[in-house]
């Protein structure tokens, strides 16, 4: 048969082109949806979609949903596969124009079924927010295609057209119009145009489906999501800051009956981790603000000046004074003066009380006032002030962070710190002397989280929790301090050594709430380092020969289900099911350079032999990774590695068990 090609297309040809374009575009959408049904999550939650849709339905529809739940639940695997096959077939038929008449009817019925079951008839339907549901929109598009095809007749941009030319009876499945037999060649685009268009559609579908995994796991590429995704600990340098915050309790401001306190609010950039800064609101240019040290009974004359860019105020937890008079907002450039008598001894918080108070405290506006009791506590050789607080951040630029109010409201801190900066007293320990009393004034500035304060390897000799020293508790190992509260902890540690102090909420400790009390001997010498002691030999069970076990396995094929299970059993506790790792403890596998490297040698070597002390993405992780060469065979290691290379948006090259075998033998 001859083919008529026109270099200039007449108006009569455009309806068929437009119809085919609409059908193919709709097919691309169905192809993406069909690809999603082949994900493991779809199968896992298949029945859950029905239960979710059934919630909130009116009573007269309850039977409909119970019918489908009862039908699908015992046959979930069958229905999952039927859904996958039907959606894939519809997508392929739309893209190619196969059996269009039958296709559109099946598409309408299937979409109505999805709409009335898994989508729960769409919704919500409220004024200004109507969500019909995706499937009912598909019904309308199928109906539109039926209407267009019934008027347009044979479409030369479909598989149906070529089948009909050979078998005219195919029209019963493909055409809606009256003309069942192709009587003359319709005008159509030349193959030089059609073939590139078909290839472009094919490439588009491949890229859309290939990118689905990352699309499901990666937030929209916006400045806001990018800034929120960066944590200060992920940016922190492995080199400690040169100078920590001085934690020593300063001398009394004065010894007379009254003392003058001058505090200034100002905007400053402060350090919150090694090499990471934060745009803070401060008292006196530091976070925490200056330590105020007074004696019980003294009158404290406060002058508060606001050099910041917005309203601020001050609230002393040590004061009994009218807040409506003294804790009022002070405009930029203005000051307020007031006095109070420090009648109650203890360690107290002061902070900005301007709404939203959560934001002002979390942005750095807090400090400590220590009121010594009129009857002095037992003398201490060393006294330190520790203020625990949280930072809630988002990246401003580079290593500069700013506030994230959403994280503050949800109590999801990026750091929990002592005296403003994560891990600073781990890198620069506080010094004490063996056998001498050391006193710790601990205040929890919050603004959200409690502290469970503990010194590892020690017992508190005294814990002073209120103004009456007779109420002191003895022999306490851990004591809770709530947001806005304070307590005084006395220790007498007999032996030199390094004694970590922590918030015993270990999630807080891992985010920075850990330091070290370095207890030295009477000669001032640093405590001795631990000596390695060889363990006594014990009879060991004969090691399994993993190399021999691997040989007996036969040809390797990646099993995604086994890979996920092996990762969950061996890796997820440290690197997390999300592949995000644990900041400062275990590196993330999502986006990890070794996981994405086309040369898998490094990735395989780490799983086989373990890793410790290596810089990964600018961070050196203290916790070692154990080797798995003696506990997992080649196929199991390959399954784990391939799981890591194909999960959480990673698109690394998969490996074989033979590659593991080759590196195991080295």
Image (cartoon, grey):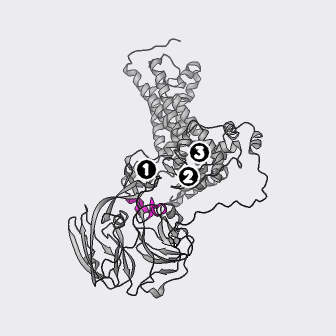
- Could you say which is closer to the camera, residue 196 or residue 584? 584
Q: Give the range drawn in magenta.
A: 404-428
Q: Residues within 10 Å of mark 3 (few under 14, many from 20)?
A: many
Q: Classify mark 1: helix, strand or loop.
A: loop
- Could you say which is closer to the camera, residue 62 or residue 490? 490
Q: Can residue 239 be seen in this view?
A: yes
Q: Is residue 163 positioned above or below 273 on the image?
A: above
Labelled disc at residue 131? 1
Where residue 345 appears, as percent x and y from the top left, is 38, 82
Residue at screen point 22% across, 66% down: 331
Q: Classify mark 2: helix, strand or loop.
A: helix
Where residue 132 appears, as percent x and y from the top left, is 44, 48
What residue would you read off at disc 2? 49
What residue would you read off at disc 3? 644
Q: Classify mark 3: helix, strand or loop.
A: helix
Distance, label 2 to label 1, CA atoms, is 17 Å
Where residue 75 appears, as percent x and y from the top left, is 66, 49
Q: Can residue 502 be seen in this view?
A: no
Q: Of label 2 and label 1, which has the lower sequence position? A: 2
Residue 314 placement: quadrant: bottom left
Distance, label 2 to label 3, CA atoms, is 28 Å
Where residue 233 appears, as percent x and y from the top left, is 46, 55
């Amino acid at each position: 048969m001859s083919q008529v090609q026109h270099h200039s297309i007449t108006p009569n040809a455009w309806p068929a082109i437009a119809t085919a374009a609409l059908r193919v575009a709709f097919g691309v959408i169905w192809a993406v949806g069909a690809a999603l049904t082949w994900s493991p999550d779809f199968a896992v939650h298949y029945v859950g979609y029905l239960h979710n849709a059934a919630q909130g339905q009116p009573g007269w529809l309850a039977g409909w949903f119970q019918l489908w739940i009862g039908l699908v639940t015992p046959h979930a695997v069958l229905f999952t596969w039927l859904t996958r096959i039907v959606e894939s077939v519809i997508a392929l038929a739309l893209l190619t124009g196969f059996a269009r008449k039958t296709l559109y009817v099946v598409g309408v019925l299937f979409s109505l079924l999805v709409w009335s079951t898994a989508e729960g008839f769409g919704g919500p339907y409220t004024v200004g927010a109507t969500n019909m549901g995706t499937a009912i929109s598909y019904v309308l598009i199928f109906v539109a295609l039926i209407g267009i095809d019934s008027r347009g007749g044979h479409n030369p941009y479909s598989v149906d057209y070529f089948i009909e030319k050979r078998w005219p009876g195919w029209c019963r499945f493909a055409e809606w119009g009256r003309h069942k037999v192709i009587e003359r060649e319709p005008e159509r685009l030349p193959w030089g145009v059609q073939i590139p268009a078909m290839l472009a559609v094919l490439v588009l579908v491949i890229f859309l489906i290939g990118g689905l995994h990352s699309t499901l796991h990666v937030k929209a590429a916006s400045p806001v999501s990018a800034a929120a995704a960066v944590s200060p600990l992920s940016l922190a340098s492995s080199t400690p800051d040169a100078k920590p915050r001085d934690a020593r309790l300063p001398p009394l401001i004065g010894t007379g009956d009254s003392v003058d306190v001058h505090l200034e609010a100002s905007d400053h950039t402060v350090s919150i981790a090694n090499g990471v800064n934060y745009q803070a609101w401060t008292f006196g240019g530091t976070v925490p603000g200056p330590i105020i040290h007074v004696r019980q009974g003294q009158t404290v004359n406060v002058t508060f000046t606001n050099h910041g860019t917005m309203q601020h105020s001050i609230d002393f937890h040590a004061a009994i004074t009218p807040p409506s008079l003294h804790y009022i907002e002070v405009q930029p450039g203005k000051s307020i003066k007031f006095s109070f008598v420090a009648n109650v001894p203890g360690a107290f918080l002061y902070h900005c009380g301007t709404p939203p108070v959560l934001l002002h405290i979390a942005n750095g506006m807090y400090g400590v006032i220590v009121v010594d009791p009129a009857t002095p506590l037992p003398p201490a050789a060393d006294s330190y002030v520790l203020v625990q607080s949280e930072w809630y951040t988002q990246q401003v630029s580079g290593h500069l962070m700013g506030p994230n109010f959403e994280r503050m409201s949800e109590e999801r801190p990026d750091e929990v710190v002592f005296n403003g900066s994560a891990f600073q007293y781990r890198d620069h320990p506080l010094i004490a002397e063996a056998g001498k009393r050391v006193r710790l004034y601990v205040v929890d500035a919050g603004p959200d989280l409690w502290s469970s304060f503990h010194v590892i390897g020690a017992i508190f000799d005294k814990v002073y929790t209120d103004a009456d020293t007779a109420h002191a508790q003895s022999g306490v190992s851990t004591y809770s301090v709530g947001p806005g509260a304070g307590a005084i902890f006395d220790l007498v540690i007999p032996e030199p050594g390094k004694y970590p102090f922590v918030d015993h909420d270990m999630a807080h400790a891992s985010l920075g709430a850990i330091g070290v009390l370095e207890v030295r001997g009477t000669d001032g010498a640093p405590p001795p380092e631990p000596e390695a002691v060889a363990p006594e030999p014990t009879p060991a069970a004969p090691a399994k020969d993993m190399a021999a076990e691997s040989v007996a396995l036969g040809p390797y094929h990646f099993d995604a289900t086994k890979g996920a299970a092996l990762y969950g059993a061996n890796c997820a506790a440290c690197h997390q099911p999300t592949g995000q790792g644990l900041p400062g403890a275990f590196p993330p596998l999502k986006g990890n350079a070794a996981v994405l490297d086309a040369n898998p040698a490094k990735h395989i070597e780490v799983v086989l032999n373990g890793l410790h002390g290596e810089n990964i993405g600018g961070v050196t992780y203290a916790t070692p990774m154990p080797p798995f060469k003696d506990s997992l065979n080649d196929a199991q290691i390959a399954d784990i590695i391939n799981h890591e290379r194909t999960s959480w948006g990673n698109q690394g090259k998969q490996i074989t068990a033979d590659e593991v075998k080759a590196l195991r033998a080295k």
